Image (spheres, rainbow, N blue to C red):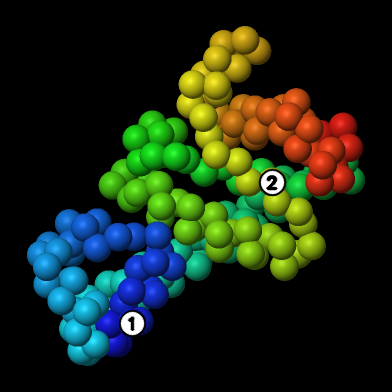
């Protein structure tokens, strides 16, 4: 693997050099030197990143397949994918994903979206605003769950006119 492949692979995974350095135990300046040099990347680092990339592909297909299975009737015209503005927001909603950054989750959603669209299913993508979402939860008297998050996204999109703009009627 060459340095350009290292850059492309880490960007596909939504990871920066600082995160990879912490994760692998390699100094950031060594990783920067590899990316700048055009030299061959050590096999161990290549194997770790390639393994993560393959795992992300598997996770994306598994998660997309599970989400597509939730389309239970003809009224559902799209799936909601929710991303997060910050690592803190991501970890607050998905504590099991720490230490992965929100950018990793976004990269995973990109892969899921591509897979879902291959099945001619529309995707509504939204950024989770924890303050608005928390206020909405209190207003509708619900607890946090994936179903609640999707309901919030759909209601927010419907209220903003976003669904109508893209041809989805009545939030369906």
Residue 78 versus residue 150 in the image, above or below: below
- From this viewpoint, is residue 41 visible? yes
- Residue in the picture at 65% in, 27% down: 152
> Image point 43% across, 72% down: which residue?
54
Q: Quadrant of residue 98?
A: top left
Residue appearing at x 63%, y 52% in the figure? 66
Direction from residue 18 to residue 96 in the image, left or right: right
- Label 1 SS: helix
Provide the residue designation for mark 1: 4
Name the residue carrying label 2.
Answer: 124
Q: Is residue 82 above or below residue 59?
A: above
Mark pair 1, 2: CA separation: 32 Å
Q: Position of residue 171 (x, y in %)?
A: 81, 34
- Residue 73: percent from the left, percent from the top? 86, 43
Q: Position of residue 142 (x, y in %)?
A: 60, 16
The residue carrying pointer 1 sits among few (fewer than 14), some (14 to 19) or many (20 or more) residues within 10 Å by Cα, namely: some
């Amino acid at each position: 693997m060459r340095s350009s492949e290292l850059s492309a692979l880490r960007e596909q995974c939504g990871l920066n050099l600082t995160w990879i350095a912490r994760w692998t135990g390699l100094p950031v300046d060594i990783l920067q030197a590899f990316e700048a040099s055009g030299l061959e990347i050590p096999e161990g680092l290549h194997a770790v990143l390639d393994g993560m990339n393959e795992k992300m592909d598997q996770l994306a297909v598994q998660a997309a397949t599970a989400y597509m299975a939730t389309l239970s009737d003809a009224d559902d015209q799209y799936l909601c994918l929710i991303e997060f503005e910050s690592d803190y927001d991501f970890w607050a909603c998905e504590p099991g994903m720490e230490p992965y950054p929100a950018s990793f989750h976004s990269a995973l959603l990109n892969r899921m979206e591509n897979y879902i669209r291959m099945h001619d299913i529309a995707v509504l993508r939204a950024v989770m605003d924890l303050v608005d979402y928390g206020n909405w939860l209190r207003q509708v008297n619900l607890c946090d769950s994936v179903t609640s998050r999707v309901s919030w996204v759909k209601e927010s999109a419907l209220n903003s006119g976003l669904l109508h703009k893209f041809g989805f009627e009545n939030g369906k």
